Every structure is written in structure tokens, then in C-alpha cells.
């Protein structure tokens, strides 16, 4: 074994090695490229009286009282004071002994995000340590890195592993090749690769903390360049491979397509028709299509997908329709069934949650040549054998991580013949993003909304006036309208989010006695979720309390009022997506963005943009300007991140330099290209055949 093998690290046995491999980490150098997601500043204590909501903080104080509040689910509530103020700590998951350890007078040091609660500020599930008398632990002397992880792999493990990997780097035991061309590095005066890695994993005391936290440190720039180049290269390679393959050419299926058009209750918009033409000419070719369709929320991408699917079916090949969430996939199942069913094409349903006999039946149908298969990305994973897959449609692809996206695009690369691919997204793509994340893809834009869409009036209102908003919901619903109440929590577990939504639903139910209120969140079983959605769609519910699971694709035209709580916590694109759920029917629609005071200047400005415009493209550009592209791309921290260091807004000036270098590398140093892509994109690149 070489110094690069994971098993040579202390504490890494076959089990941990296997888990790491599952995350795409196969060697000690791979560990070094598993970079901190963020840093926690535990170098100082903040007075509780001076805390601001929305920001993380470390505080120390004494427990005033701790009690388990019994509700639908018990919750541990602790009041902590330090002489300057008090804060509430809330735990939805806790053990009995935990509650007993927190008696009055216990000293605690806590780290967590401060948020506004019903009574003053609170922290939900802070990290905390008890401090025994006379044993005050020292404060950290440097920023604490926080690594992206998955369930069961704690931060302590990551710290231990990265510590050892860094030691080997220092000993010169690892050969970390410089893969960036000298020309590129020449003028930039950036640190060497080992120095950059060391600094990012363990920022020394006194380092420019603000720059690091803002991801605007030269060491981060150094790696960002490489990462951006790797992404650009990966897309080019994918495209190149795609072009070199054969595909089954799909001729117009005039009868089927016309039959659907005739059955639709609307005419296609000019933009939909044009995009269909563009797709049609790609599909008729003998090389696989790789086309991205971008259309704002509500622009009608689904019918475009359905018509493309019909064409495929008319040519005797199979279509896979893939959505990022169960709820959206279910919605597609129903739409496709409603539209294609009468034409004799009944879609087959398959997600990872389909088990047992139903799964066997679905797999048999797929292997037997069923025309249209709808599901989540589980559909594209191993073990699902198609008879003759001719077209893959990926919806709302921005919700997929890079890894999943690459894997999806690489699917079906087992023979020389590959399926055509249609990728749909509602996230407007600023030019900079397109150059990097989608280099080499053909792009179609649906730049027109269906006729008769009513603008959604948006109001930005302080949570101090929540009472009035509740009254407004009551009034609207009593008048026959339907409404959404969206609860937002970010960077929290689904369980905490579900719990918070449950509380809001209970509270609203208590206050709005006459209304029929439903609740959806990510913790419900698919059938339960579907039951609630169906009831809402059928008009059997007046008010739907939901987490952001309803963000994408949900289509209930009669819903014309949406309340979004703590709107300041969400990215603008996400707010735009959410708001796109209303304004779909004939009624005038409105959206209320509730924010918790006090709110920062930038947060205020962002919400103002939502009030001013409904143009997704403008919103995305503004968002990019104000916050950086991680949010624009919809980076939700679901295990693995999209870009590890790159920030397209900050690094925009680098982007123009990347395409020529990428072309040069592909032409002259193909070996280097593969290593770069593997270093940054890892397993999914392998899976995609890059
Ligand atoms: P998105 O692009 O956000 O996926 P959908 O495909 O869900 O949008 O379409 C939104 C709504 O608009 C659906 O109810 C759909 O049936 C309807 N729709 C689509 N195209 C048209 C059109 N040309 N005219 C009127 N309504 C349309
Ligand atoms: Mg859609």
C-alpha cells in the first residue's frame, strides 16, 4: 500500500474506507480535496444581549430553567442567561439524560444560529458543552472547519482524517500534481496547491477570517480556478463523447402529437412551438441530443416534454421522465397519465420507494418496452434495464447536484447507441453560469408565458403584523380562494423542518377554526403526501401549510394566495419558484413575504426585488449580484455541494480565461484533463464515462 491508500490512515478500517468511497473519496489526496463547506468562528464569546437573528454565534451562560414541553412531540426547552440577556435553546431530538443534565445553574457554552422565536431569540439544536466549575475550556485559536458530510459521519471524524492527510502533505509523502497550465497561473500570483489546501483546511490564527468566511481568500481563488476549469472540461468531454455516439433518429409522430395538441385545453405559445421545433430537429439526427430547455416558472415546459415523449413513443423507443423530488415526479405521473393515457400510452411509475411486487411489476414493464416511465433519479440507477431507451427527460435539473446530473447524463453509455437527452430548468442561467456549468449544451429558451397569466401582487410585511396576515388568509379562504402557508427553515434536518411546519399548522388550525387545513412536509409517506396534495387540488382543503417541498412543479390553479414565513432566509430563485405556485388560475393572486425584524439592508433589498418584478431572469441576475451563484444554482446542502470553492459572481473575471485553456488542454493534454475532472468531480465523472 502506498501513502495514498485510505487504509493507511489511523482509524480507517474497511468499513470507514467503504463509506468514504461512497462519497467519492478513494485516496488520501481525495480527502484533501474534500474541502470545508464553511467555518465556524468559535474564537470568541458573544454577549447574549447583543445577538442578531440570522447569524451564527457562540455564547456562554447559565441555565435559568430547562423543561420538557409536552406536545404532539416532546421538546426540550432551555432558557440560558449571561447577565446581558437571555436566549431560548430548543431541542426536538433529545434524550432523557440530556434534560436531567441541564439543571438550573448549569454553565453551558453553545454555538448555533440565532433566530427569532415566539418569545425573543432562540437557537434550535445548538452545539453545546457543559462547563464544569474551574474547568473553563480555552476558546478555539482558529476558525473551525465544517466539512460536508452525510448521516453517521461526524465532524470529529473529518477533522481526524484531514489532520492526518495534511500531515502527509507536509511530509512530502503525497505527490499532488500541479494540473493547471503554467500560463494560467503566471499572472495570478496565487499560492501553490499544497499551501492553498493547507490554509483552507486549517486557517492559521490571525488569517483573514472575513475573506475566508466570504470565500474570497486567495487560497480559495486558487482552487476555484481549478474547479471551474474541471467543470468546464467535464461538460465538454461529455458533449464530445455524446457527439461521437449514435442515437436512434426520431421522426415526427404526426398523428400522436396532433392528437395531444387537439386534446389540450389551450394552444401552444409561440415560444413553446419554437422550442419544440428545435428539439424536433435534434431528435431527427443520428447523434444524441443534449439540449437544455430553460423556461421560467409556469412557462409550460411539461407540455413540451410530453410532446417530445410522444414523438419518441411514436418511433417505438422508450422515454424516461426524471424529476428531483417524489412530489414533482408524482405530479408528472398524473399529468402524463392524463395527457398520454387516452392515446394508449399509460406511464409506468418507479422510484426508490416502490418496493416488492409493485417494483417487480414496474421493472418487468420497463424491460418489456413500456413507452413512458416516470420517476425520481432512482430510475436511472443500476438495476433498471430498459428495452430500448431512446429519450431521457430530466426536469428541474437545477435541483440535482452536479454528481447526479453527471450520472444522469452519462447513463445509457453501455453501447454505442445512446438516448437523446432533454434537460429542463426553471432557473434562468446567467451567461457566466452557462459557460461553466453547461459548457457545450444546446440551449432553448421558452421566453413567453401562456396568455392570461395574471401578475402576482407581492407584499413584503414584517412578522410583527402576522396577525393581520392570518386574518387576510381567513378572509380569502372564506371567500372561496385557496392558500399556501410556507414554513421555511434552512440548513436544518427534514425532521426539524417538519416539526416546525406541524407547529404552524397546529397554531393556524387553532386560530382559523372554520378552515380546512392540510399539511405537507418531506417526512410524510408518499401516499400521505399525495393524499394531501390531491385533497388540496380537489378543493377539499382551504389552506395548505407546507415546507419548501412544494417549491417545484406543484400546480393547483385555484390557489391564489401564498404566505411565505421568514422569507429572508431563502434565496431569491427559491422565492421565485415558490411564488410561481400562484397566479396560475383566473383569480388575481397575491404573495406575502413575511420577514422577521430586524432585517439587514441586503436582505431588505433582496425582498424588494421580489416585490418589483416577476421576471425570473432579472431576479436571478440580481440574486447573483447580491449573493453569489451558489444560491442561484439552488445549492441546498443535501449531503454534497455543487461547487466546493468556486463562486461564479466573485470569480466571474476568471471565466473568460477558462474556455481557451480548456480547449487547449483537451487538444494537447488529454491525460491531464481526465485527472482534473476526477479530482474535482470524482465518481460521477467516472460514472459518466469521463
Ligand atoms: P413549468 O414550465 O413551470 O413546468 P408547467 O408545465 O407546469 O410549467 O405549466 C404551468 C401551467 O400552465 C400548467 O397548468 C399547464 O397546463 C399550463 N399551460 C402550459 N402551456 C400553456 C399554454 N400554452 N396556454 C395555457 N396554459 C398552458
Ligand atoms: Mg415544471
Image (cartoon, rainbow, N blue to C red):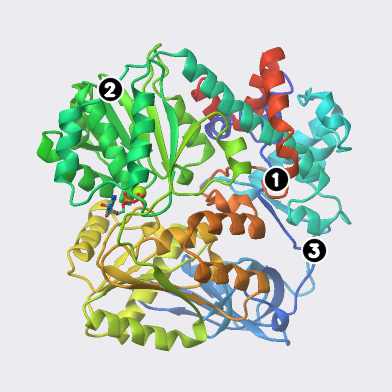
Residue 22, position in %: x, y?
A: 52, 32
Q: Which residue is mark 3?
A: 43
Along the viewing direction, whichever of 613 and 473 lies nearer the viewer: 613
Disc 1 secondary structure class: helix
Q: Residue furthest top?
A: 416
Examine the rendered structure and indicate whether residue 452 appears above or below residue 312.
below
Examine the rendered structure and indicate whether residue 167 appears above or below residue 112.
above
Disc 2 secondary structure class: loop
Q: Report the mark closest to the observer, 3 or 2.
A: 2
The numbered dot on residue 386 is: 2
Q: Is residue 446 visible?
A: yes
| Marks 1 and 2 in Cβ contact (< 8 Å) | no
Residue 539, position in %: x, y?
A: 18, 68
Disc 3 secondary structure class: loop
Which of pointers 1 and 3 lies earlier in the amino acid sequence?
3
Q: Which residue is mark 1?
A: 159
Q: Is residue 152 visible?
A: no
* Residue 560 in which image quadrant: bottom left
Position of the N terminus by quadrant: top right
Which of pointers 1 and 2 lies earlier in the amino acid sequence?
1
Q: Residues within 10 Å of mark 2 (few under 14, many from 20)?
A: many
Q: Which residue appears at 39% of the width and 51% of the height? A: 448
Q: Report the mark closest to the observer, 1 or 2.
A: 2
- In the picture provided, is 588 more to the left or to the right than 53? left
Q: How many marks?
A: 3
Examine the rendered structure and indicate whether residue 366 appears above or below residue 644.
above
The numbered dot on residue 576 is: none
Along the viewing direction, whichever of 445 and 317 lies nearer the viewer: 445
Q: Residues within 10 Å of mark 1 (few under 14, many from 20)?
A: some
- In the picture provided, is 529 more to the left or to the right than 93? left
Which of pointers 3 and 2 lies earlier in the amino acid sequence?
3
Amino acid at each position: 500500500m502506498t501513502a495514498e491508500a485510505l487504509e493507511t490512515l489511523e482509524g480507517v478500517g474497511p468499513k470507514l474506507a467503504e463509506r468514504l468511497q461512497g462519497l467519492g473519496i478513494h485516496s488520501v489526496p481525495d480527502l484533501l480535496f474534500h474541502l470545508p463547506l464553511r467555518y465556524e468562528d468559535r474564537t470568541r464569546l458573544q454577549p447574549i444581549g447583543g445577538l442578531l437573528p440570522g447569524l451564527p454565534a457562540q455564547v456562554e451562560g447559565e441555565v435559568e430553567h430547562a423543561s420538557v414541553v409536552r406536545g404532539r412531540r416532546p421538546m426540550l426547552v432551555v432558557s440560558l442567561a449571561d447577565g446581558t440577556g437571555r436566549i431560548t435553546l430548543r431541542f426536538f431530538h433529545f434524550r432523557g439524560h440530556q434534560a436531567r443534565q441541564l439543571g438550573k445553574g448549569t454553565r453551558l457554552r453553545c454555538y448555533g444560529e440565532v433566530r427569532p422565536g415566539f418569545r425573543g431569540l432562540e437557537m434550535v439544536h445548538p452545539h453545546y458543552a457543559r462547563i464544569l466549575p474551574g474547568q473553563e475550556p480555552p476558546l478555539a485559536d482558529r476558525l473551525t472547519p465544517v466539512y460536508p458530510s452525510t448521516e453517521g459521519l461526524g465532524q470529529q471524524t473529518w477533522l481526524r482524517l484531514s489532520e492526518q492527510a495534511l500531515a502527509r502533505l507536509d511530509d512530502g509523502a503525497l505527490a499532488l500534481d500541479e494540473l493547471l497550465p503554467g500560463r494560467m497561473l503566471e499572472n495570478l500570483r496565487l499560492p501553490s496547491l499544497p499551501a492553498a489546501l493547507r490554509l483552507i483546511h486549517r486557517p492559521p490564527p490571525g488569517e483573514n477570517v472575513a475573506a475566508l468566511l466570504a470565500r474570497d481568500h486567495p487560497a480559495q481563488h486558487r482552487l476555484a480556478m481549478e474547479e471551474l476549469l474541471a467543470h468546464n472540461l467535464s461538460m465538454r468531454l461529455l458533449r464530445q463523447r455524446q457527439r461521437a455516439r449514435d442515437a436512434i433518429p426520431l421522426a415526427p409522430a404526426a398523428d400522436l402529437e396532433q392528437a395531444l395538441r387537439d386534446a389540450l385545453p389551450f394552444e401552444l405559445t409561440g415560444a413553446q412551438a419554437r422550442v419544440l421545433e428545435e428539439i424536433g430537429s435534434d431528435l431527427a439526427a443520428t447523434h444524441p441530443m443534449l439540449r437544455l430547455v430553460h423556461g421560467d416558472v409556469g412557462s409550460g415546459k411539461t407540455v413540451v416534454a410530453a410532446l417530445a415523449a410522444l414523438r419518441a413513443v411514436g418511433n417505438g423507443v422508450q422515454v424516461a421522465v426524471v424529476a428531483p423530488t417524489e412530489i414533482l415526479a408524482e405530479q408528472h405521473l398524473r399529468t402524463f397519465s392524463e395527457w398520454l393515457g387516452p392515446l394508449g400510452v399509460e406511464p409506468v411509475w418507479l422510484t426508490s420507494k416502490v418496493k416488492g411486487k409493485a417494483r417487480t411489476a414496474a421493472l418487468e414493464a420497463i424491460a418489456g418496452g413500456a413507452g413512458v416511465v416516470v420517476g425520481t433519479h432512482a430510475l436511472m440507477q443500476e438495476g433498471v434495464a430498459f428495452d430500448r431507451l431512446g429519450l431521457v427527460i430530466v426536469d428541474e435539473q437545477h435541483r440535482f447536484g452536479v454528481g447526479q446530473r453527471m450520472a444522469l447524463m452519462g447513463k445509457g453509455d453501455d453501447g454505442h447507441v445512446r438516448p437523446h437527452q432533454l434537460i429542463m430548468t426553471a432557473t434562468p442561467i446567467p451567461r457566466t453560469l452557462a459557460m461553466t456549468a453547461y459548457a457545450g449544451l444546446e440551449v432553448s429558451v421558452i421566453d413567453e408565458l401562456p396568455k392570461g397569466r395574471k401578475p402576482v401582487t407581492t407584499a413584503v410585511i414584517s412578522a410583527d403584523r402576522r396577525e393581520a396576515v392570518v386574518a387576510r388568509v381567513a378572509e380569502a379562504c372564506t371567500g372561496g380562494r385557496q392558500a399556501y402557508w410556507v414554513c421555511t427553515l434552512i440548513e436544518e434536518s427534514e425532521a426539524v423542518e417538519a416539526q416546525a411546519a406541524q407547529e404552524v399548522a397546529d397554531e393556524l388550525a387553532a386560530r382559523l377554526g372554520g378552515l380546512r387545513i392540510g399539511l405537507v412536509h418531506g417526512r410524510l409517506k408518499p401516499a400521505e403526501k399525495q393524499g394531501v396534495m390531491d385533497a388540496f387540488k380537489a378543493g377539499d382543503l382551504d389552506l395548505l401549510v407546507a415546507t419548501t417541498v412544494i417549491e417545484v412543479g406543484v400546480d393547483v390553479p385555484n390557489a391564489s394566495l401564498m404566505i411565505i414565513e421568514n422569507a429572508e432566509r431563502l434565496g431569491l430563485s427559491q422565492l421565485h419558484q415558490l411564488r410561481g405556485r400562484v397566479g396560475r388560475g383566473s383569480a388575481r393572486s397575491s404573495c406575502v413575504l413575511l420577514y422577521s425584524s430586524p432585517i439587514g439592508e441586503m436582505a431588505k433589498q433582496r425582498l424588494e426585488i421580489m416585490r418589483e418584478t416577476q421576471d425570473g431572469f432579472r431576479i436571478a441576475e440580481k440574486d447573483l449580484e447580491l449573493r453569489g451563484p451558489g444560491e442561484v444554482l439552488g445549492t441546498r446542502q443535501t449531503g454534497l455541494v455543487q461547487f466546493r470553492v468556486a463562486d461564479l459572481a466573485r470569480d466571474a473575471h476568471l471565466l473568460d480565461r477558462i474556455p481557451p485553456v480548456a480547449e487547449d488542454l483537451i487538444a494537447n493534454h488529454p491525460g491531464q484533463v481526465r485527472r482534473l475532472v476526477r479530482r474535482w468531480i470524482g465518481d460521477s465523472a467516472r460514472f459518466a464515462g469521463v
